[in-house]
C-alpha cells in the first residue's frame, strides 16, 4: 500500500521535474509528451492497485517535513473511501486530458513548459487529496494555485492572459488566509494538525469555536472553489489553453474547496451555523453562476459560469450534510465538465480559435465526432432524466429537502430554479453552436474546416460514457443500492435516507423542471427561431442581460472597492508617508545637525583632529557621567 | 575533535585573506582567484563545524555550545576573547560563508575598477560578520559589530550608483547612532554588574542574570533594541535600507540583505532577550506591533515600486518583520521559525538581488517599465527568477514558507491579533511578486533590449541557491534539529 501511495504522487511529480529539466533539449517532443501522459496513467494504475488492495482507511508516513518541538507535520498520506474515489477520478480524467492535450498543443512551441506544469499540477492536487495533515494539504493547495497561475497565463505575451493568471492566484490566496488561521488556531486548541485526529476531537471545544473554525475554512473554500463572493477569478481563468481549463474546472483545483469542507466535516459539521453558511453560499453561487451563464457569448465563459454554479450545488450538498451525494456530484461533474471543456476545445480548434458562439453554427455536420459527446455532456449538465447528472444533482436536492424547515426549504427551491436555468443555458449552448448553418463568412462554410487531431475526439468518448452512465455508480435506493453510497458512507454517519415514495416524487419534480428548461430553450432557439434570437442577442447587451453578462458587475465593484484603493494607497504610502514624512523628517534632522556642526566649525579653527579630540572628550564625559550615576 | 584554535581560524581566515589581497592591487585576476579560494576555504571550514556537533562539550562552555574558546585579552577591564558556537551560530556562520562566496561570484565581472579593493572589503566584512555571530563577550561583539560596517560604507560609497555618497552616509549615520547607544548600554551593564558582584566582566554568561531596576533595565534594553531595530530594520527605522540597496553594487546588496540584516535579529536573540528578560517582556508588544506594521506597510509599499532593487529592498523589510514577530512571541516554535527564516531570507533575497544585478549588468537599468517579455528572450533566467520570486512569496514547498509558517504557528499562542494580521501580510508579497513577474517576464517587450541568457557562472550560482531553497523547503528537519537545543535553552522549554 505504501508503494502504491508513493507512486500515485511521485510519478506525476517526477514526470514534471524530468520534463522541466530535460524536455525539449534531451528528450524529443514525442518523448516529452509520452512521458507526461505515461506518468499520469502510471499514477492511475497505482491508484487502481491501491483500490484493489484497499480494506480499511490507512495512514502512511513517508518522511518528516515540518517538525519543531511539539509541532509536527510530516509527509503523511491518508487513504479512505473519499480520497480514494477522488484519486481515481483525478488520475483518470487528467490522464485523458493529457492525451487530449497532445493533440491540442501540437503546434505550440512551449510544449515542455506546458506538460511539465500540467504534471506538477496533478501531483500537487494528489498531495492535497491524500494529505493527512493540514499543512501538507496546504502544500498541495498552494501548489495547484501556483500551477494554475502559470497555466492560465501560459500564453503570457497577451497582458490579459497574464493578468487573468495573476488574478486567479491572488483571489484564491485571499481565501487561504482563512485556512492558514484555522490551521494555527486548531494547533493551539488541539495540539495537533492531523486531519484524522482533529476530526475526532471536535467535542472538546465549545460550539462557538467550532463555528469560527468552520467559517474560516469556508472562506478558504470560497476562494479555491470560486464561490460567492470570491468567484471572480474563474471566468477570467478561461484565458489558459483549453486542456488547462478542463483540468482546473473539472477534475482538480476548483473542487479542492469542497473537498476541504468534506474532509473536515466531522469537525465543523457539528455547528449548524457553519452548515447553514455553507448551504447558503452554495445555493447563492449556484444561482449566480447559472444566471450569468444564461447570456454569455463566449463558449468557454458559459462553461466557466456553469462550473461556478455546479460547484455551488456541491457546497449546498455539503451544507445539507450530504457528503456522499456531494461527492457523487463532484465525480459526475468532473466527467461531464471535462467532456464539455474538451469538446469546446475541439469546437474552438475547428473554428480556428473562434470562441464566440454567435459566430458558430451547423457544427453537428462538420464535426459529428465532437457533437455527440458534447451533446452527452450537455444533457448531463441539463439534468436530463436517467443521465448521471440527473441522479447526482437530485441526490443533493433530495438531501436539502430532507433537512426540511423554512431555511432549507427555500434553498431547495433556489436549487430547483437553478436547475431550470441550467437546463436552459445548456441546451441554448448546444443549439447555437451545433444547430443551424455554418455562418456564411466563415471559412468552414467553404469546406476549409481544420482537421482535428483524432486523439482529441477519441478522448471524449470515455468521458461521455461515464457522464451518461455514471448514474449507475450510485443508483437511488429503490433501484438497488448505490455502489458509491455504500463505499463512501462511514459507520455512524448520519446522512438520512429519503422514503422511496418521496424520493420518486422529488425526482419526478426534477425531471419536470429539466424538461421544462429544455423546452424553454427549444422554444427560444430551436429550428428557425435560432436565427432571429441570434440577431436579437447580437445587439450590445442592455439592462438585465448586460448585468448578467458582466457577472453581476462584481468585477467592477471590486475594482472600485479594493483594487484601485490598494494601488492608490500604495503610492501614497510610499511617496508621502515613507519618503515624505518618515524619511524627510530624518533627513531634516540630519541637516539640522549639519548646520549645527558648521556653526561650531565656524567658531573653531576647523581642524579635524581638534574636533575628534572634542568628540572623544564628550564621549568620555558621557561615560563618566553614566558611571557616576550608576555608582 | 578539532583543536581549539578552530574558531580563531574560522574568524580570521577571511581577514587574513583580505590582507593578502592588499598585495595584489595591480593584478586583478589573481586577486579574484585568491579571494574566491579564501571564501571557498572558509565555506568548507564553516561546513566542517557541522560535524563538531554532538562531540564532547568543551570545558567551561555554556550549555548548548559545542565549540568554545576563552582567552584573557585586556584583563584589567575584564575583556576576554570569548568565542562560542552553538546551533544558531553554526547555521548563521555557514550562511555567511556561503553568501560571501556568492557575493564574490556575482561581482566577478561587473566590478572593473579597483577589483582587489572590492574583494578585500568583502572578505574583511565576512570576518566582521562571523565575529558578530561567534562573540560571547560584549566588548568583542561590539568591536565586530563596528568592523562590519566600515567595509559596507566603502562598498556603497565607491562602487555604488546614483546617489551613492548620500546613501552610504545615511547608512552609516543610522547604524552608528544605534550602535553608539548600544555601546553606552554595554558599558552600563558592565558597571552595574561589577557593582553588584564585584567582578567586572564583559562576558555574556557572566552578565546574564544581572539584576536591574525596572527603569534601568528598560533604558539599557531600549538602547540595544534601537541598535538592533535599525539593523533589522523595523519600521520606522527602515528608510536607510531602500536607499542603501538601490545605490549599492550587487555584492553590497547581497551581503546587506543576506547577512547584515540578520545581525540585528541575532543580537536580539543572543543578547537582548537573555540579558534583559524582564524589560524584553515589557517591550514585547512594541516589538510585535512594529513587526506586524512592518510586514503590512513595507509589503504594501513594495507594490508601488518602479525600481526592482527598491522593490526587493522593501520586500526585505516585510520579510524581516516576520522574523521580528517570531522573536517577539518567544515561543520555541516561533523562535525556531524566526531563526530558520533568517537563513531562508538570506538565501532567497540574495538570489533576487543577484538576479536583478544580472539584468542591470546587461541592460543598465533597474526600472521595471524598461523590461517586459523577458521569458521569450532569456528563459533560463526567467525560470530561476520565478522560482526565487515564489520562494519569496512564501509558496509552500520552498524555503520561506517553512519559516513563516512556524513563526505564525508559534506566535498565535501569544499574540492572536498580530498573527491574524500577519496572515494578511502573507498574501501581500504575492501581490507585488506576481506584478513584478508579469511586468518583467511576461507580456511584450517594452524597450528593445538585446539580452543574453545566463552564463555558466551565473547558472552555477543560482543552481546552488535554488537547491538550497528547495531542500530547505522540502526537508527543513536537519536545520530545525540543529536549532533545537539552543532554542530550548533560550526559551526555557524542554528540547
Image: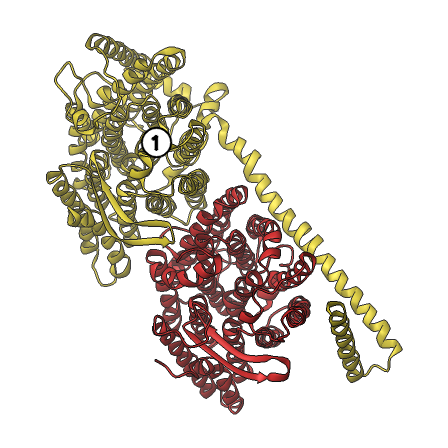
Chain colours: A yellow, B red
Residue assigned mark 1: A267
What residue appears at the point 61 percent right and 43 percent down from the top-left corner?
A568
Foreground of the two, A15 or B10: B10
Direction from residue A60 to residue B153 in the image, left or right: right
Left of A458 or right of it: where is A122?
right
Please give left or right for residue A608 compared with residue B61 in the image. Answer: right
- Give residue A567's position: percent from left, percent from top: 58, 44
From the image, which quarter does the N terminus of chain B lie in?
Answer: bottom left
| Quadrant in which residue A260 is drawn | top left
The total of numbered circles placed on residues is 1
Q: Position of residue A400 (x, y in %)?
A: 32, 17
Q: Residue at x 46, y 30 (%)?
A: A229
Provide residue A305's location: percent of width, then percent of height: 37, 28
Residue A353 visible from this viewpoint:
no
Indicate whether B487 appears above or below A265: below
Above or below: residue A523 compared with residue A97: above
Chain for disc number 1: A
Looking at the image, residue B31 lies above or below residue A28: below
Decide which of B327, B60 is in the foreground and name it.
Answer: B60
Rendered location of residue B401, percent (x, y): 41, 52
Q: Secondary structure at mark 1?
A: helix
Quadrant of the frame with the C terminus of chain B: bottom left
| Vertical position of residue A92 compared to residue B249: above or below | above
* Left or right of residue B462, residue A88 in this image: left
Amino acid at each position: 500500500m505504501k508503494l502504491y501511495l508513493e507512486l500515485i504522487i511521485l510519478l506525476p511529480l517526477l514526470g514534471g521535474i524530468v520534463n522541466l529539466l530535460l524536455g525539449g533539449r534531451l528528450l524529443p517532443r514525442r518523448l516529452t509528451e509520452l512521458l507526461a501522459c505515461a506518468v499520469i496513467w502510471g499514477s492511475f494504475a497505482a491508484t487502481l492497485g491501491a483500490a484493489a488492495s484497499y480494506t480499511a482507511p490507512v495512514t502512511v508516513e513517508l518522511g518528516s517535513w515540518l517538525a519543531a518541538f511539539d509541532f509536527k507535520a510530516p509527509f503523511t498520506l491518508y487513504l479512505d473511501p473519499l480520497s480514494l474515489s477522488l484519486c481515481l477520478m483525478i488520475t483518470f480524467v487528467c490522464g485523458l486530458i493529457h492525451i487530449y492535450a497532445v493533440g491540442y498543443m501540437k503546434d505550440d512551441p512551449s510544449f515542455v513548459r506546458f506538460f511539465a506544469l500540467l504534471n506538477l499540477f496533478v501531483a500537487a492536487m494528489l498531495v492535497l487529496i491524500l494529505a493527512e495533515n493540514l499543512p501538507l494539504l496546504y502544500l498541495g493547495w498552494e501548489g495547484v494555485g501556483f500551477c494554475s497561475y502559470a497555466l492560465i497565463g501560459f500564453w503570457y505575451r497577451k497582458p490579459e492572459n497574464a493578468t487573468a493568471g495573476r488574478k486567479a492566484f491572488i483571489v484564491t490566496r485571499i481565501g487561504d488566509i482563512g485556512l492558514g488561521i484555522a490551521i494555527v488556531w486548531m494547533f493551539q486548541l488541539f495540539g495537533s494538525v492531523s486531519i484524522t485526529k482533529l476530526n475526532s476531537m471536535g467535542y472538546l471545544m465549545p460550539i462557538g469555536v467550532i463555528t469560527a473554525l468552520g467559517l474560516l475554512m469556508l472562506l478558504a473554500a470560497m476562494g479555491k472553489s470560486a464561490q460567492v463572493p470570491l468567484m471572480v477569478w474563474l471566468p477570467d481563468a478561461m484565458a489558459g489553453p483549453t486542456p488547462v481549463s478542463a483540468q482546473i474546472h473539472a477534475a482538480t483545483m476548483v473542487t479542492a474547496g469542497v473537498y476541504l469542507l468534506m474532509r473536515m466535516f466531522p469537525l465543523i459539521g457539528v455547528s449548524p451555523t457553519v452548515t447553514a453558511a455553507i448551504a447558503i453560499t452554495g445555493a447563492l453561487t449556484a444561482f449566480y453562476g447559472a444566471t450569468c451563464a444564461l447570456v454569455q457569448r463566449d463558449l468557454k465563459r458559459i462553461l466557466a459560469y456553469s462550473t461556478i454554479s455546479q460547484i455551488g450545488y456541491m457546497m449546498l450538498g455539503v451544507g445539507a450534510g450530504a457528503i456522499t451525494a456531494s461527492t457523487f456530484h463532484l465525480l459526475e461533474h468532473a466527467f461531464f465538465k471535462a467532456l464539455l471543456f474538451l469538446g469546446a476545445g475541439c469546437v474552438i480548434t475547428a473554428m480556428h480559435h473562434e470562441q464566440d458562439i454567435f459566430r458558430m453554427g451547423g457544427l453537428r455536420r462538420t464535426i459529428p465526432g465532437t457533437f455527440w459527446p458534447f451533446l452527452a455532456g450537455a444533457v448531463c449538465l441539463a439534468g436530463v432524466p436517467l443521465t448521471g447528472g440527473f441522479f447526482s444533482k437530485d441526490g443533493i436536492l433530495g438531501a436539502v429537502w430532507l433537512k426540511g424547515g423554512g431555511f432549507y426549504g427555500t434553498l431547495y427551491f433556489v436549487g430547483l430554479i437553478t436547475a431550470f436555468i441550467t437546463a436552459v443555458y445548456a441546451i441554448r449552448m448546444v443549439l447555437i453552436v451545433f444547430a443551424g448553418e455554418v455562418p456564411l463568412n466563415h471559412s468552414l462554410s467553404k469546406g476549409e474546416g481544420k482537421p482535428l487531431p483524432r486523439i482529441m475526439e477519441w478522448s471524449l468518448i470515455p468521458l461521455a460514457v461515464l457522464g451518461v452512465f455514471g448514474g449507475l455508480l450510485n443508483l437511488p435506493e429503490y433501484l438497488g443500492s448505490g455502489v458509491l453510497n455504500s463505499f463512501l458512507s462511514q459507520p455512524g454517519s448520519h446522512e438520512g435516507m429519503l422514503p422511496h415514495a418521496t424520493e420518486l416524487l422529488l425526482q419526478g419534480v426534477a425531471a419536470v423542471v429539466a424538461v421544462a428548461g429544455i423546452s424553454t430553450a427549444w422554444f427560444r432557439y430551436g429550428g428557425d427561431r435560432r436565427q432571429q434570437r441570434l440577431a436579437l442577442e447580437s445587439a450590445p447587451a442592455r439592462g438585465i442581460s448586460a448585468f448578467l453578462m458582466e457577472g453581476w458587475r462584481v468585477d467592477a465593484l471590486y475594482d472600485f472597492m479594493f483594487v484601485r484603493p490598494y494601488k492608490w494607497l500604495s503610492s501614497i504610502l510610499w511617496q508621502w508617508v515613507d519618503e515624505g514624512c518618515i524619511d524627510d523628517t530624518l533627513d531634516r534632522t540630519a541637516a539640522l545637525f549639519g548646520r549645527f556642526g558648521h556653526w561650531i566649525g565656524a567658531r573653531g579653527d576647523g581642524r579635524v583632529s581638534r574636533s575628534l579630540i572634542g568628540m572623544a572628550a564628550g564621549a568620555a564625559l558621557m561615560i563618566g557621567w553614566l558611571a557616576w550615576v550608576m555608582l | 575533535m578539532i583543536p581549539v584554535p578552530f574558531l580563531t581560524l574560522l574568524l580570521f581566515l577571511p581577514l587574513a585573506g583580505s590582507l593578502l589581497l592588499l598585495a595584489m592591487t595591480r593584478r586583478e585576476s589573481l586577486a579574484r582567484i585568491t579571494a574566491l579560494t579564501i571564501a571557498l576555504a572558509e565555506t568548507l571550514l564553516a561546513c566542517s563545524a557541522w560535524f563538531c556537533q554532538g562531540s564532547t562539550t568543551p570545558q567551561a562552555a555554556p550549555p548548548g555550545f559545542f565549540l568554545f574558546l576563552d582567552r584573557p585579552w585586556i584583563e584589567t577591564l575584564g575583556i576576554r576573547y570569548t568565542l562560542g558556537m552553538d546551533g544558531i551560530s553554526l547555521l548563521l556562520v555557514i550562511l555567511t560563508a556561503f553568501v560571501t562566496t556568492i557575493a564574490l561570484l556575482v561581482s566577478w565581472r561587473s566590478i572593473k575598477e579597483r577589483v582587489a579593493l572590492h574583494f578585500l572589503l568583502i572578505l574583511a566584512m565576512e570576518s566582521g560578520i562571523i565575529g558578530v555571530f561567534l562573540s560571547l563577550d560584549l566588548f568583542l561583539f561590539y568591536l565586530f559589530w563596528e568592523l562590519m560596517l566600515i567595509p559596507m560604507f566603502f562598498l556603497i560609497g565607491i562602487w555604488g550608483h546614483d546617489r551613492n555618497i548620500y546613501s552610504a552616509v545615511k547608512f552609516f549615520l543610522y547604524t552608528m547612532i544605534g550602535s553608539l547607544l548600544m555601546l553606552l548600554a554595554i558599558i552600563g551593564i558592565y558597571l552595574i554588574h561589577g557593582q553588584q558582584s564585584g567582578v567586572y566582566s564583559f562576558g555574556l554568561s557572566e552578565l546574564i542574570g544581572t539584576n536591574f531596576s525596572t527603569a534601568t533595565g528598560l533604558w539599557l534594553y531600549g538602547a540595544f533594541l534601537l541598535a538592533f531595530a535599525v539593523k533589522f530594520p523595523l519600521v520606522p527605522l527602515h528608510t536607510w535600507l531602500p536607499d542603501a540597496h538601490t545605490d549599492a553594487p550587487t555584492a553590497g546588496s547581497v551581503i546587506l540583505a543576506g547577512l547584515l540584516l540578520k545581525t540585528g535579529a541575532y543580537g536580539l536573540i543572543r543578547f537582548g532577550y537573555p540579558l534583559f528578560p524582564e524589560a524584553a517582556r515589557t517591550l514585547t508588544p512594541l516589538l510585535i506591533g512594529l513587526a506586524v506594521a512592518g510586514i503590512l506597510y513595507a509589503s504594501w509599499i513594495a507594490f508601488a515600486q518602479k525600481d526592482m532593487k527598491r522593490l526587493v529592498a522593501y520586500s526585505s523589510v516585510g520579510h524581516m518583520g516576520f522574523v521580528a514577530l517570531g522573536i517577539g512571541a518567544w515561543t520555541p516554535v516561533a523562535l525556531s521559525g524566526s531563526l530558520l527564516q533568517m537563513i531562508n531570507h538570506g538565501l532567497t533575497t540574495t538570489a533576487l538581488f543577484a538576479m536583478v544585478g544580472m539584468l542591470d549588468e546587461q541592460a543598465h537599468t533597474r526600472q521595471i517599465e524598461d523590461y517586459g517579455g523577458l521569458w521569450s528572450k532569456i528563459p533560463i533566467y526567467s525560470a530561476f527568477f520565478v522560482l526565487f520570486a515564489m520562494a519569496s512569496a512564501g509558496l509552500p514547498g520552498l524555503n520561506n514558507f517553512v519559516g513563516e509558517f512556524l513563526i505564525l504557528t508559534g506566535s498565535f499562542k501569544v499574540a492572536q491579533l498580530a498573527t491574524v494580521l500577519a496572515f494578511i501580510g502573507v498574501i501581500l508579497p504575492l501581490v507585488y511578486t506576481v506584478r513584478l513577474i508579469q511586468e518583467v517576464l511576461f507580456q511584450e517587450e517594452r524597450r528593445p533590449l538585446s539580452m543574453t541568457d545566463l552564463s555558466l557562472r551565473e547558472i552555477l550560482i543560482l543552481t546552488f541557491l535554488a537547491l538550497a531553497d528547495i531542500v530547505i523547503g522540502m526537508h527543513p528537519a536537519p536545520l530545525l534539529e540543529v536549532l533545537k537545543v539552543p532554542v530550548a535553552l533560550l526559551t526555557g522549554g524542554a528540547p
